[in-house]
Image (tube, helix red, strand yellow):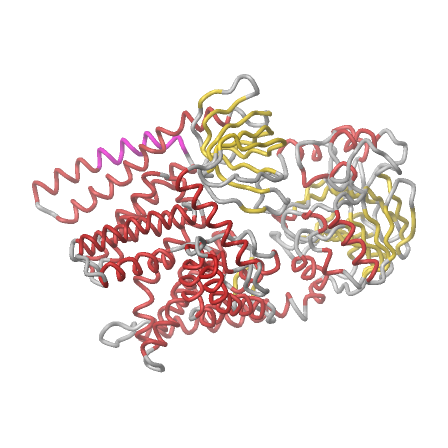
Amino acid sequence: MSRRDLRLVPVASAAWVAALACAFVPALGWWMLACSLSTGAALVFVARRQGRGGASLAALACAGAAAVALTCAISIPVRSAAAELDGRIVTVEADVSSSSTTGADGRVWFDAQTVRIGPRGAERELSVAVRVGVDALDDAVLGARIRVTGQVMATEPFERAALVVFATSSEVISPAKGVFAIAAATRADFVTRAVRLPEPGAGLLPGLAVGDTTAVSAELNEAMLTSGLSHLTAVSGANCAIVVGAAFWFVALCGGGRKTRVGVALATLAAFVVLVTPEPSVIRAATMAGLAMLSVLLGRPSAGASVLCLAVTGILVSDPWLAATPGFALSAAATGALVLLAPPIARGLERWMPHPLALGIAVPIAAQLVCGPIIALFAEQQSLIGIVANMLAAPAAPIATVVGLLACLAAPVPFAADLLAASAWLPAAWIATTATTTAAMPGAQLLVVPGILTAAIVLVLSAACAVLLCRSRAGAGPPRTMQRAASAVLVVGIALGAARILLDGPLAVVAVPADWSIAACDVGQGDSLVVRSDARIAVIDTGPEPEALTRCLSSLGVERVDLLVLTHFDLDHAGGASALVGRVGTMLHGPAGEPEDESLIAAFAAGGAAAVEASAGQRGTLGDANWRVLWPRANQAAFPAGNDASVVIDMEGTDVPRSIFLGDLSATPQRLLAASGLLRPPYEVVKVAHHGSADQDAGLYAALSPAVALFSVGADNDYGHPREETMDLVAATGASVLRTDQQGRILVGRRESGLVVWTERSDDADAPGEVGGPG
């Protein structure tokens, strides 16, 4: 890689910095445009007068930053107009612009570009990106026009979608047409054909071939994330390279010239992008592949870094908000790693192995080293098994991708499509097995606090690994002093990592205070609380995933659960329940609304639990503590199964402070609960309803008068939980506000001086925080 090939890096960097600045602070748009243009003009003058190439390059970087700033500045009025709709019930008419995914709340989510939006009867033209969540909507595929009605929430300035729409009603008013309809039908046919094959591998195959992950189970998706293999189901540069290379080779085989080969390859690439839907990573990969084809046409096929820089700059000029999306950053970083870092790492590995093997191992190592710091900015875990898992899966991935794509395209010939799909199943099954096996290994991932500090630590460790592995073309490594420093960094890092694994695993119980009685587990966007009295354990909800619940219970030394309360059966409250089957004595649950709910109840009953539907008036004991069910009322029909029929329970004992757990009740049932006469305020601890949503009754919290308010909420949620107005409402009662998204696992205990609180993340982790009695 020559310095000449790296000359466009400052241009892409300037565009990215400008995009980030304008996305986070929109008011900078016009100011940055003016500064970039004036600086660029001065640099052009210098370049002409003195003939300095560096000044010309700097001027080009200013031009890229100016173009990005102009795009942002032009978008400010439209996004501001959209933000004025925050909290309102609106009707949205929009064109679907992405594939759909299923969120933790069970909703189907997709991106769309609005055509008309506003209160019913007063809609207006407003072209802005929105994120739409619906209960279910068939035919909502790329190119379809939809109409939805629901509440909207304005997003943060840096988010790509200006609004999030929580739809209560939805319809497709114009299905996808032309190539979009053909692509959707082709994908759907391939998914149907693939899922007829046996697991593991059947549901994963469409993801590997065309990026369709609708058939991937939640368990396999979690395993793919843990093992660092989730990138295989995201259409990326590798997929585009395979498609372009195959088209290029086929035309060359037929005797076509360079121009014909490039033209056919670009047309094939465009068709592939439509087939897999143009997600940010696909856009980046396709743009880079297209520019690569042009570089071939111009006789510069090796200018990979320059091509990547042009692709990044062009994409950010058209959509600056991609700069703040993790997917786009990871996609660009991974491509840069393959172009710049993989070759020197491969040369370093050639000291111990043949070149083909060294190159195959260098690719996942390079991608992992470069992507690790970016992942640490927003992810709560770092994969420690990712490199090994990628090495095992790497040989099977291109086979599954190529053969699976051929199976998808062969849909008009069912026999050939079935044969190709069956052939692609074996490598897909190998990848799925690799993911589940490696993810289940002890220490497969390390839980971390996402943010700049964690990213900086990962960056230092990644740089140390690169220093030790890389070699120049002449076979020389970095200076020996640098290698010694890198070795010292890795030794310290490995020692600290091993200590963390021990503290999170076998020694986790040692780090937990002995006198806790209530624990709010950090399970992401969901609820899971544990109450302990006289060695007896109650678990109230299980969070969205079994793994997070298992980690929390293991750290608390909980093996057996005497009382399980499932307040209702939404995924964020009951998704992790499978981890407790066979370990529960009594199960109290809210009304079952779906067949899946009945199946879960039956599973617990088969595992030895006494399953009882909860209703107000039921009571019992947990060790030295007494518990009562306060809601829902028996045989009530006013509230259907779900949030407003959540089980509300209170507890009190010698070692358990008087506590109330409000499930997901909204304001209306909260008012009814407050008027029921069943409450025994003041309560020392309250679990705030519905993760701190805005739909709360101030009168209830004033009556409860808590000393501690627990918000069980995930850092990454599309709802804006907890809402500022709800935190202000609770704080006004005199309660100490505690949030699992910011403070991790929260423990509450009782001492003679009052309540005492321990948080997983705090300025002084060793010193418990003391809280006064109830107000």
Q: Position of residue 453 (x, y in %)?
A: 49, 55
Does residue 195 appear to the left or right of 687 in the view shown?
left
Position of the C terminus, as image quadrant, is top right
Q: Nearer the viewer, residue 508 or 561?
A: 561
Left/right of residue 440 with respect to residue 93 in the rendered view: right
| Residue under the image location 66 percent in, 36 percent down | 693
Q: Residue at x 71, y 35 (%)?
A: 730
Instruction: Locate the N terminus by quadrant.
Output: bottom left
Find residue 748 and report its horizontal and vertical position in percent.
75, 51
Whether residue 161 can be seen here: no
Question: Residue 46 in magenta?
Answer: no
Camera-side residue of 249 and 574: 249
* Span of residues in magenta: 26-39
> Which residue is painted at 30% across and 62% down in the image?
340
Give the percent coordinates (x, y) of residue 438.
56, 70
The answer to whether residue 29 is magenta is yes
Q: Is residue 692 visible?
A: yes
**Furthest residue toward bottom:** 352
Compared across the picture, whether 266 is left or right of 378 comes to left
Look at the magenta stretch and give its main secondary structure.
Answer: helix
Residue depicted at x 34% and y 62%:
338
112 shown above or below 618: above
Instruction: Tally the numbered discs.
Output: 0
The image position of residue 550, as x and y in percent, is 69, 61
